[in-house]
Image (cartoon, rainbow, N blue to C red):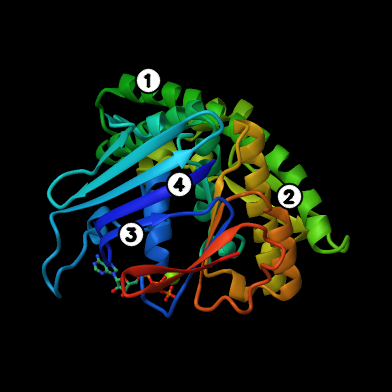
């Protein structure tokens, strides 16, 4: 899929912007704090209904001066696919929840947005996935699975709701309380039902992803390193029901759910060495790049279409060789890159593209490739 154009109104530092993107590579260059990443953030909003930088919706409303913010912000995006095209509208409001529409039909839950626009983001934060805590890796796997499976999304929403209800119940009822224990029986049963589905899907997905990661990483490192991912479920699906019932008293005592997929993790191994513990900074970065590249292949495999790539400020951190390998892996995929200067980019092989200068909320086309 390819983004044809994006239009912003009162989003971040843009009073108004209409930007047509080329099918190949799109380079947004400019000094710091001009609004380059803001454009990627707006694109990501249309794909996942949230910011990839963890910003709250209200922060996206444009400040007109130091104190006052606009009441509304709008993003409109047109995405072309093989046989169709879709229009996505995001309306962010100061005093209400944001509204999203696809082809002018309001989207009632995020599930309806899945697959309309698939993007893969490379940002300094998500190339840190190996160094960070388990929650970051769980989020990574969840957002990948969500982008290819509505069923996974629904199971995850239900699981999180039940986990939340169970934890509230546990907090409000002490170990010796005489309240209604049948409610906890019901919550436990539902918890195990959805948790098992999540564990199974994560297991299958990580197995597949690991195989692709392995191949890519072998090429990137010129055959020197063999990388694999291993899923570390906190509790195996077939043991979960017993674990939950055995630990009921403990859960009541601490007021939380001690076992389940909300505590899962993933380990990365290079030549059988745990990268998080023993890997160098460069190895962690390269392993993360291989994983992101594998994510692109997985999306193509599962949906039949390429995602759009967003590279936020990551190229300057890669040496010439790694940049070349990255570009050779993303030929024919529409890519939007932010950088402060493009002289050092190894884009000579890219056949189609446009270079834009971003300056204080204005975007000017400078040249085409
Ligand atoms: P860098 O090269 O440092 O990453 P960038 O061009 O990617 O810079 P962005 O993060 O896209 O920068 O934009 C930052 C600019 O947007 C800053 O000048 C900031 O003050 C402005 N900005 C952020 N949020 C808002 C907002 N809600 N209203 C108005 N301006 C905003
Ligand atoms: Mg930026």
* Mark 3 in CB contact with mark 4 (< 8 angstroms): no
- Residue 238, placed above or below residue 128: above
Which sits earlier in the primary sequence, circle 1 or circle 4? 4
Q: CA distance from mark 3 to mark 2?
A: 30 Å
Which is closer to the viewer, label 3 or label 4? 4
Which residue occupies the foreground of this view, 248 or 80? 80
The residue mark sitting in front, 1 or 2, is 2
Q: Earlier in the sequence, mark 3 or mark 1?
A: 3
With respect to residue 101, does 49 lie above or below? below
Locate the C terminus by quadrant.
bottom right
User: Residue 186 — which label?
Assistant: 1
* Among the two numbered marks 1 and 2 on one chain, the one whose residue lies closer to the N terminus: 1
Q: Residue at x 57, y 60 (%)?
A: 353
Q: In the image, which is nearer the foreground, mark 1 or mark 4?
A: 4
Which is nearer the eye, 17 or 261? 17
Classify residue 192 as left or right of residue 164. right
Q: Residue 54's image quarter?
A: bottom left
Q: Which residue is mark 3?
A: 55
Q: CA distance from mark 1 to mark 4?
A: 49 Å
Left or right: 293 with respect to 54? right
Q: CA distance from mark 3 to mark 1?
A: 36 Å
- Secondary element at image label 3: loop
Of circles 3 and 1, the one toward us is 3
- The numbered mark, 3 or 4, whose residue comes first in the sequence reads 4
Q: Which residue is mark 2?
A: 213
Which mark identifies residue 134? none
């Amino acid at each position: 899929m390819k983004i044809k154009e994006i239009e912003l109104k009162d989003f971040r530092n843009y009073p108004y912007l209409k930007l047509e993107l080329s099918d190949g590579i799109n380079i947004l260059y400019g000094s710091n704090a001009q609004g380059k990443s803001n454009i990627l953030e707006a694109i990501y909003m249309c794909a996942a209904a949230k910011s990839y930088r963890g910003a709250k919706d209200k922060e996206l409303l444009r400040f007109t001066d130091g104190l006052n913010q606009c009441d509304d912000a709008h993003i409109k995006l047109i995405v072309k696919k093989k046989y169709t095209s879709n229009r996505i509208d995001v309306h962010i409001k100061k005093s209400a929840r944001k509204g999203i529409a696809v082809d002018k039909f309001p989207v009632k839950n995020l599930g309806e947005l899945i697959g309309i626009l698939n993007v893969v983001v490379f940002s300094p934060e998500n190339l840190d996935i190996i160094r960070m805590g388990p929650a970051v890796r769980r989020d990574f796997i969840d957002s990948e699975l969500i982008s290819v499976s509505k069923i996974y999304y629904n199971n995850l929403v239900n699981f999180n709701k039940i986990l939340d209800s169970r934890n509230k119940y546990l907090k409000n009822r002490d170990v010796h309380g005489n309240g209604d224990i049948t409610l906890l029986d019901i919550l436990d049963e539902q918890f195990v039902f959805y948790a098992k589905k999540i564990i199974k899907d994560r297991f299958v997905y990580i197995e597949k992803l690991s195989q692709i990661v392995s191949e890519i990483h072998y090429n990137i490192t010129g055959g020197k390193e063999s990388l694999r991912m291993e899923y570390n479920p906190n509790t195996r699906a077939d043991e979960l029901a017993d674990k939950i019932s055995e630990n009921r008293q403990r859960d009541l005592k601490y007021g939380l759910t001690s076992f389940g997929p909300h505590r899962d993790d993933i380990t990365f191994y290079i030549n059988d060495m745990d990268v998080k513990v023993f890997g160098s900074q460069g190895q962690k970065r390269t392993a993360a790049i291989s994983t992101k590249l594998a994510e692109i292949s997985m999306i193509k495999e599962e949906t039949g279409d390429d995602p759009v790539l967003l590279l936020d400020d990551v190229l300057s951190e890669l040496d010439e060789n790694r940049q070349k390998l990255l570009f050779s892996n993303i030929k024919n995929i529409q890519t939007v890159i932010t950088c402060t200067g493009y002289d050092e980019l190894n884009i000579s092989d890219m056949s189609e593209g446009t270079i834009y200068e971003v300056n204080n909320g204005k975007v000017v086309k400078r040249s085409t490739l």
